Structures are given as structure tokens and as C-alpha cells.
Image (cartoon, rainbow, N blue to C red):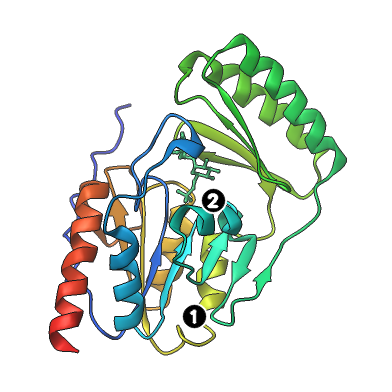
């Protein structure tokens, strides 16, 4: 049976002053790089996000699979409300980070076994995220199969954990929250409460964010062409997403 045809979705309308923006990081705000530490924040993006945050009363949040500390380091000196580790960490408008959980001992064994696979497949990466671990094969496609098999078999020894599939990566992470839950929680408090949630992202983990924004009466913007998707709108790629944000800055500035 052939795969379903990709949905043709409309481009999102221009950013409105009553919106709250929830922005995924890798593959959405930022172009992919071979290694997680090699991503670039394009010139002007930090300033654009800061301007959007000012124009939207502070209601702009990062929603990432990375740890919040990593997101902060990438975008410094900009520091926005954020969800990290796919919603397991949360920093609301008050600036306090809620961390999720301790690292189970068995995760160290998984990392050690994955490092052996990576040694045999130069370019494969094991990313230690504390309570989660990400096994990457972007620069070593042949490592995909052994890394996926390792993650799947480790799951049985990690109660309360789930597999998180993503773009050239599989992760083992605690199952008790997701990006949708993070959006719902942020939307309950200032400066997000009372605004229209608009969520942009590119990956499977962002479908939870799309679902939450849609259920709250907002919009969801798929970046790229991954399908099927719950998104209501789409932009072709990261450059188009950034152009849309820059247009939003100009528009909010003009109407302020
Ligand atoms: O939710 P996100 O902010 O999109 O984070 C998802 C994962 O992003 C990172 O991995 C991805 O980007 C890397 C850098 O471009 C790339 O090398 C990798 O192939 C991608 O999967 C990050 O390293 C993960 O921890 C995040 O969960």
C-alpha cells in the first residue's frame, strides 16, 4: 500500500498581538547540523525573538527536546520561558526551572552500550541529557539499526520510560510528560494565559504541541513536510519559519 499523500496546508497568518508563541528549536528555529553542539543561531534571530517577546507581552516560549540549560546556552543572552526534554523540564514566566526526575542507574549502561555502537560507526553520537539519552545517526546512517535495536531492548529495564523517535535520532526518556502538557501548563499562567496559542515545530514530538494548541483553539504550524500531521498550517522550512517571525517583528512594531 502506498503512503498517504502529504497534506497541503495553508501558510500561517501574520503574527498577531494577542498570540502566545511556542517555538520548537532544532529543525524549526535552527537548521540541523551533524552534531547537536554544532548548530548555529542565525544572525538576528535572538534579536527577533526578543522583539517578539516584547510585542507579545513576554508570551514566547522555547519548547525543545534539549535541556533548558542547553537552550539557554545556545540563545544567550536571550532567556525565555521554556520547556526542555520534550516537556519534562519547565520554566514558566517566573523564571524558576522545574526539573523532572533523577537518572536511573540503568541509563548509564545504555549509554555505555551505545558508545560501543558509536565506536563502530564513526559519526554516530550518544547525547547524555541526564534523565534522558539520545542516540544519533545523522552522520552515520548505518548506525540507525543497531541504535534503534539497543534502545528498544533497553526499554524493558527502564520502567516509566518511553522511546522518542525523531529526526535521525531515537531517545529514551521518562514518559510522564510531553510537549503538549508543557503548552497546557504554560497557558495556565502569566504571561500566556488568555492568549491564543500558536505552536511551530517540525518533528514527531511536536505533534503533542500541535494537538494542545489546536484543542485550546489556537494554530499549529508544521515546518517542513513530515506527515501525517495534526498541524493546521505549514511553512516549507526553517528559513521560511524565520522569515515569518521577522515579518511578525515588523508587523508588531508597526502596530505598537
Ligand atoms: O525538540 P527540538 O528542539 O527540535 O529537539 C529535538 C532534538 O534536537 C537535537 O537533535 C536534532 O538536532 C541535532 C542538531 O541539528 C541533529 O544533529 C540531530 O540529528 C537531530 O535529531 C538534540 O540533540 C536532541 O537532544 C533533541 O531532543
Label 1 or label 2, whichever lies nearer to me, is 2
Mark seen at residue 103: none
- Report the residue at 55% width, 21% height from top: 124
**Occupied quadrant, residue 86:** bottom right
Q: Alpha carbon of mark 1 to alpha carbon of mark 2: how far?
A: 19 Å
Residue 108 versus residue 178: which sits nearer the camera?
A: 108
Q: Please identify the residue farthest to the front as the structure is shown.
A: 77
**Occupied quadrant, residue 209:** bottom left
Residue 231 versus residue 252: which sits nearer the camera?
A: 252
Work out which quarter of the rendered image holds the N terminus and state it.
Answer: top left
Residue 8 versus residue 256: which sits nearer the camera?
A: 256
- Using residue 117 as the reference point, say whether residue 170 is left or right of it: left
**Helix, strand, or loop for circle 1?**
loop
Mark seen at residue 187: 1
Q: Position of residue 66 (x, y in %)?
A: 55, 50
Mark seen at residue 65: 2
Q: How crowded is the residue under tag 2: few (<14 C-alpha within 10 Å), some, or many (20+)? A: many
**Helix, strand, or loop for circle 2?**
loop
- Using residue 62 as the reference point, say whether residue 107 is left or right of it: right
Mark 1 near mark 2, Cβ–Cβ under 8 Å? no
- Using residue 109 as the reference point, say whether residue 135 is left or right of it: left
Q: Is residue 181 visible?
A: yes
- Report the residue at 68% width, 53% height from top: 175
Q: Please identify the residue farthest to the top as the structure is shown.
A: 120
Work out which quarter of the rendered image holds the C terminus and state it.
Answer: bottom left
Amino acid at each position: 500500500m502506498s503512503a498517504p499523500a502529504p497534506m497541503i496546508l495553508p501558510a500561517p497568518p501574520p503574527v498577531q498581538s494577542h498570540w502566545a508563541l511556542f517555538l520548537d528549536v532544532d529543525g524549526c528555529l535552527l537548521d540541523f547540523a551533524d552534531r547537536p553542539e554544532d548548530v548555529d543561531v542565525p544572525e538576528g534571530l535572538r534579536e527577533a525573538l526578543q522583539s517578539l517577546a516584547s510585542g507579545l507581552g513576554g508570551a514566547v516560549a522555547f519548547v525543545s527536546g534539549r535541556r533548558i540549560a542547553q537552550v539557554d546556552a545556545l540563545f544567550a543572552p536571550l532567556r525565555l520561558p521554556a520547556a526542555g526534554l520534550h516537556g519534562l523540564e519547565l520554566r514558566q514566566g517566573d523564571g524558576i526551572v522545574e526539573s523532572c526526575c533523577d537518572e536511573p542507574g540503568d541509563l548509564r549502561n545504555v549509554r555505555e552500550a551505545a558508545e560501543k555502537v558509536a565506536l563502530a560507526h564513526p559519526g554516530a553520537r550518544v547525547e547524555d541529557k541526564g534523565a534522558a539519552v539520545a542516540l544519533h545517526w545523522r552522520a552515520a546512517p548505518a548506525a540507525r539499526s543497531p541504535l534503534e535495536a539497543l534502545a528498544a531492548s533497553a526499554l524493558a529495564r527502564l520502567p516509566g520510560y518511553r522511546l522518542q523517535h525523531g529526526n535521525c535520532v531515537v531517545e529514551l526518556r521518562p514518559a510522564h510528560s510531553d510537549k503538549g502538557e508543557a503548552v497546557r501548563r504554560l497557558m495556565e499562567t502569566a504571561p500566556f494565559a488568555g492568549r491564543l496559542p500558536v505552536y511551530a515545530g517540525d518533528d514527531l514530538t511536536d505533534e503533542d504541541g500541535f494537538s494542545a494548541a489546536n484543542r485550546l483553539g489556537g494554530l499549529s504550524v508544521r515546518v517542513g513536510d513530515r506527515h501525517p500531521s495534526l498541524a493546521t498550517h505549514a511553512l516549507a522550512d526553517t528559513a521560511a519559519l524565520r522569515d515569518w517571525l521577522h515579518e511578525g517583528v515588523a508587523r508588531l512594531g508597526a502596530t505598537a
